[in-house]
Image (cartoon, helix red, strand yellow):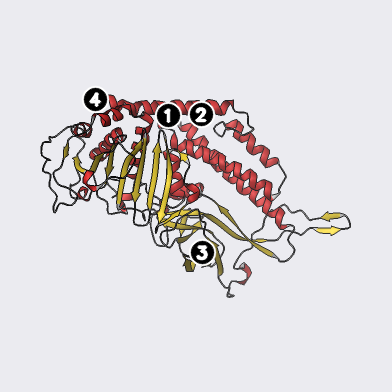
Amino acid sequence: ELHSLEQKFLSAQQWKTDYRENAKWERYLSCDGSPDPTVLQEINTFMSLWREDQNEDIQLVMEKGEHVLNLIEKLQFLLLDTPPNEITEKETLQYQESILELQNLLHQKYNGATEHLLKHQVNSCCSVIYLFLLGRDPLMQENANEKEEALPGENIVDLQQFVPVGGVYHISALQLPPQAKKIKDWNMVELLDVGLEAYTYPPEEAEDATHPPIQITLRLSDDVMYFKDPVIARWDPAGQQWRTDGISNITYKTQEKSITFEMDTFYTVALLQDVHCNMLYQAWELRPTGMDEALLIVTTVFATIQIQIKGNQCMLSSVVVEEKDVLSHMTGKWISPLDLRAVLKKAGVNIFPGEHSHKYVSVNKKAPLAEDRAYQQMALVASAFAFAWSKWNLEAGQEKVVFKVSEHLKADSIEEKDWSLYMFNGQKAQKLKITETSEAFSEELEDDSEFHSTLYHMLKDFASKEAMDKVEAASCLFIDVVYQLLLATRVLTYS
């Protein structure tokens, strides 16, 4: 019976493979004027045509820039979503190179549009400008992760512990280019080949002179959450790493959502947040809400995150911080689990442990076999059974996981009396006699129960026929999404 259910995981993988193949075909057939970023000739032609385009109107460049950012996101998604057996090493390198070339072209065009704009300025000899890029700059992130010199050290940011949240600010002082002059009916401007010229600060010719620091105030975006005072870091292009030296007198105003700091010169800066500030979770619950529908609730020290699951998609239902709904621009949209992880991380709400997270969080370490098999079998029966956090999971040791379970066929909340405790080690499941309010942990079996080799058969002993029928009828795609989210949040280890 379990083997038959587990075939649904294979069916889901085949569906996703077919979906990716169909998406390739749809891109090939589409004639909307947008290049297919996976086809080298098309993306190279697109970039060549834009390089040759001399229109430097700032509005048009920004609109075209949005299109370029969309192409970059498509390539990044393909690199994350495509299994190794469906993408060659050559294709991977091609996509990565296209991303870098698109980023470089975007900077080049922004610089050209900025120079064009500054030619019409008449009130100062220099101009301060910052370019705010939504997302982390992938180029910087990738280079920093690959450099051995970027290992944690004095003033060097450990990117396994801290990540940029809210974008990257490229701040610089620019020399004003020659200004346009109106002579009769003509507008005349001197053209220089040097492009934008940066203003060096402090000036090189006056090394002994005292120069005041540069004070910067940034208004923080409403689209991201900072649960603690952000760390401000500057990008060091020589060392390919983020550093915290050279920045001082930081003032973070929570109510105004602004941050003020001083720099000794102009830098590219980012606001960093501890990746693990929302780990460990205080509680979690997964419960069915309808046919092939469920709700995952993760409660952290700072926030309560609710994620709805329906078929092959999921939706951020709410993020509640101090009893207030936040990040409303992200809620109510049905997306893939991979997209959900990306948007939550981008917004600073990270509930997805990474490969090295156990080094930074005092985790309740569990054996991989017990944890992974538990997530698989929880997903297989998630259409009819609810699961939740138990305090006894900490007492069960590394080889076993403990969680609360309740048959749940209605879309309402679950009373405490309806929960039962189960223990599982990946090869043996049992129903425990203790409850959540018992005085001490015990592995004693519930009366009239016995051991089973699987969680599925353990639950079947106490389940109604209606519940088991619902389990049999569950969609393979729904099961796969539940499994992906459980595996991504790792609630049995990071709670």
x, y percent for residue 116? 71, 53
* Measured Cα–Cα span from mark 4 to mark 3: 58 Å
Residue identified by numbered label 3: 258
Residue identified by numbered label 1: 16
Q: Residues within 10 Å of mark 3 (few under 14, many from 20)?
A: some
* Measured Cα–Cα span from mark 1 to mark 3: 43 Å
The one of 25 and 249 positioned closer to us in this rendering: 25
Residue flagged by tag 2: what amino acid is it? Ala
- Residue 23's label in the rendered image is 2
x, y percent for residue 495? 28, 50
| Nearer-N-terminus badge (1/4) | 4
Q: Residues within 10 Å of mark 4 (few under 14, many from 20)?
A: few
* Measured Cα–Cα span from mark 2 to mark 4: 34 Å
Residue 58 visible? The answer is yes
In this rendering, position of residue 419 left or right of residue 64: left
For the N terminus, which image quadrant? top left
Q: Secondary structure at mark 4?
A: loop
Q: Secondary structure at mark 1?
A: helix
x, y percent for residue 86? 43, 28
Q: Residue at x 40, y 50 (%)?
A: 350
Which residue occupies the extreme right position in the image?
184
| Nearer-N-terminus badge (3/2) | 2
| Nearer-N-terminus badge (4/3) | 4
* Measured Cα–Cα span from mark 2 to mark 1: 10 Å
Task: Find out whether the residues at labels 3 and 2 contact each other: C-beta distance under 8 Å.
Answer: no
